[in-house]
Image (cartoon, rainbow, N blue to C red):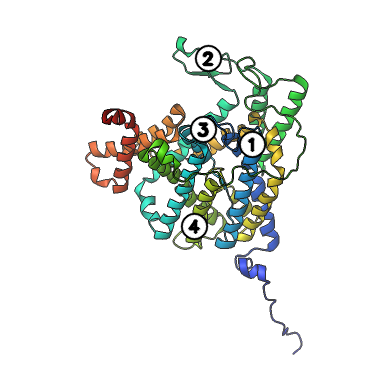
Amino acid sequence: MRGVSTSTPARPHALDRFFQISARGSTVGREVRGGVVTFFTMAYIVALNPLILGFAEDVNGDLLGGNGGDNLAAIAAGTALVAGVMTILMGVVANYPLALATGLGLNAFVAFSIAGQMTWADAMGLVVIEGLVILVLVLTGFREAVFHAVPRELKTAISVGIGLFIAVIGFVDAGFVRRIPDAANTTVPVQLGPTGQLAGWPVLVFVIGLVLIITLWVRKVRGAILISIAATTVLAIIVEAIAGIGAGGAKNPTGWALNVPALPDKIIDWPSFATLGEFNLLGSFENVGIVTAVLLIFTLMLADFFDTMGTMTAIGAEAGLLREDGTPPRTRSILVVDSLAAAAGGAGGISSNTSYVESASGVGEGARTGLAAVVTGVLFLLTTFLSPLVEIIPSEAAVPALVLVGFLMMQQVKDINWADPDIALPAFLTIALMPFTYSISVGIGAGFLAYVLIKVVRGRARTVHPLMWLVAVMFAVYFAIHPISSWLS
């Protein structure tokens, strides 16, 4: 019949069928664009992770990736490799527009709270165990029990405390905040700059970087963090070339804090994966004891596990993918890949990998499927060949990102009910003690103990989850481990 088409609709191609692109109302072009945008909004981690992990010494005074001076490039290459592989796995297995990389906060905990107590191999072994524990919790369904054991607002306080801790690290590493050299003559432990005033070109570079990153962020420029790091690094190279400032130290207090910026001999190079496989699964138990090792694993797990739950739900809500019960499709697959990523980060020697909320930027560009994650992952793999660039980035150019990330994590503080002493006091101790003691585990432990104590003295002990009782006892032993050890000996 005329005017009536007898042709059948075109059958979706294999890529469309595998990722359900049309079914989710997207196109290949949108997925590719979304994957690229996600990569550029989180690629900063390739530069930032080495600056957090690369200068922290373990119990033997060794650096992660070796003491030869090229460890930053090795950490960067490992960071990009693990992020690329695990993000591709997320796209293929879970078909979800979610990218993964080394977790900020988690890497700070490993660098500043764990590595000083043991070797780097032992510390990364703890990360592997943490990932495997989370995997077991996911596969057995026990994750719900763990998730509900810790009060929601206490989880929020942990995230806020880590954010404040990260911001403090940023200010200290930039030389904006300094330890007072002769603290015996004053009760004030820190001050502004080396003499109570800002001094030196490196601090000015940091301030300019902070102004730039804030400006870009409030203007909602995509890739604000990466743009800021790149632009401020160029400025630092120019400043160093003109002024010849040199490395900081006792004789040069206004020098560059960690590494001196200079043009690299080469931009592209075969990557060195010196950190891969550098982990000792059980060495930590021998060095710090069972109780301390278990508590460190639990602390890692707590931060990693709950962040993932919130991130995947937020991304699903942004993409319109959540089911009626508020959970994403293939929830278990998402959590399995995320758990494997945590273990893979330890095995790769670059700290636990986790899901990134920056994936929302790709979703905002139209990404709805795992194809976007595959695109992001491939770009991370290509970045491994650019790792020499990381060696030229001074901390003053990178740590403004820590300050911004700290602010973003701090925003959650509004979700805590400060009128309820049952949760307000534990939350306050959790948030305050992390930066004040330079220890994430101390903040979490104090918060957990305060929560159980307040419930008991107010006659509400029955409302405390059994797992909270167990963890509180473990933290009590953790804090009293030295007097207990002395008494037993």
132 sits left or right of 87 in the view: left
> Tag on residue 336?
4
Closer-to-camera residue (116/413): 116
- State the residue position of label 1: 72
Residue at image mark 2: 181
Type of the residue with mark 4: Val
State whether residue 43 appears in this view: no
Q: Amino acid at mark 1?
A: Leu
Quarter placement of the N terminus? bottom right
Q: Residue furthest left?
A: 459
Residue with the mark numbered 3: 58
Q: Residues within 10 Å of mark 2 (few under 14, many from 20)?
A: few
Question: Which structural element holds mark 2?
Answer: loop
Q: How many marks?
A: 4
Disc 1 or disc 2, which is closer to the eye? 1
The answer to whether residue 85 shows anywhere in this view is: yes
- Mark 4 residue crowding within 10 angstroms, few (<14) / some (14–19) / many (20+): many
- Contact between labelled residues 2 and 4, with CB atoms less than 8 Å apart: no
